[in-house]
């Protein structure tokens, strides 16, 4: 049975037709994979290219709901939160990507995720 981590609350921001910033989507991030016992990888957002498309508009595709592999799309980005249980054996892999990782040795209380195109942050 998968580890019962609390759901990650995700906020996706953008701009309306008047170029005013606003929250376009909010709620739990639901695109989770369970690659090994106790481990969960939740896709928050992805993009198809760099620089990312940050067009104005309130009708956007949920780029966190896509089914993609470990690597992002070619020339794109992938933002995921991966929860590892204590004592987890690390799995190494090689991809043609630049990865940014934040590791915490102590339990944290997860905060909300905010994503705007390729920019995102998590408050812990």
Image (tube, rainbow, N blue to C red):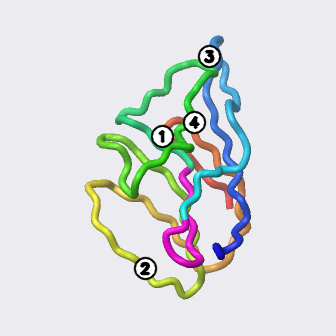
Give the CA separation, mark 1 to mark 3.
Answer: 18 Å
Residue marked by disc 3 = 19
Residue 97 screen position, x and y as percent:
31, 54
Helix, strand or loop for disc 1: loop
Q: Is residue 41 magenta?
A: yes
> Looking at the image, is mark 2 or mark 4 earlier in the sequence?
4
Check disc 2 and report the residue beneath it: 90
Badge 4 local density, few (<14 within 10 Å), some, or many (20+)? few
Cα distance between the residues tagged 2 and 4? 30 Å
Tell me the SS state at disc 3. Answer: loop
> Residues under labels 2 and 1: Cα distance?
26 Å
Residue lying furthest top: 18
Position of residue 105 relative to residue 32, above or below, is below
Magenta span of residues: 34-43
Image quadrant of residue 70? bottom left
Residue wearing tag 1: 118
| SS at badge 2 | loop
Left or right: 107 in relation to 49: right
Count of residue discs: 4
Marks 4 and 1, how far apart at CA: 13 Å
What is the crowding at mark 2: few (fewer than 14 residues within 10 Å), some, or many (at least 20)?
A: few
Q: Cβ–Cβ below 8 Å for labels 1 and 3?
A: no
**Residue 76 magenta:** no
């Amino acid at each position: 049975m998968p580890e019962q981590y609390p759901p990650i609350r995700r906020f996706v921001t953008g701009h309306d037709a008047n170029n005013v910033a606003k929250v376009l989507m909010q709620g739990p991030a639901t695109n989770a994979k369970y690659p090994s016992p106790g481990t969960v990888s939740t896709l928050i957002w992805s993009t198809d290219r760099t620089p990312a498309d940050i067009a104005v508009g309130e009708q956007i595709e949920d780029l966190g709901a896509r089914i993609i592999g470990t690597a992002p799309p070619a020339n794109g980005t992938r933002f995921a939160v991966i929860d590892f249980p204590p004592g987890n054996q690390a799995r190494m892999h090689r991809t043609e990507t630049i990865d940014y990782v934040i590791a915490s040795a102590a339990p944290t209380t997860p905060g909300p995720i905010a994503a705007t195109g390729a920019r995102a942050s998590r408050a812990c």
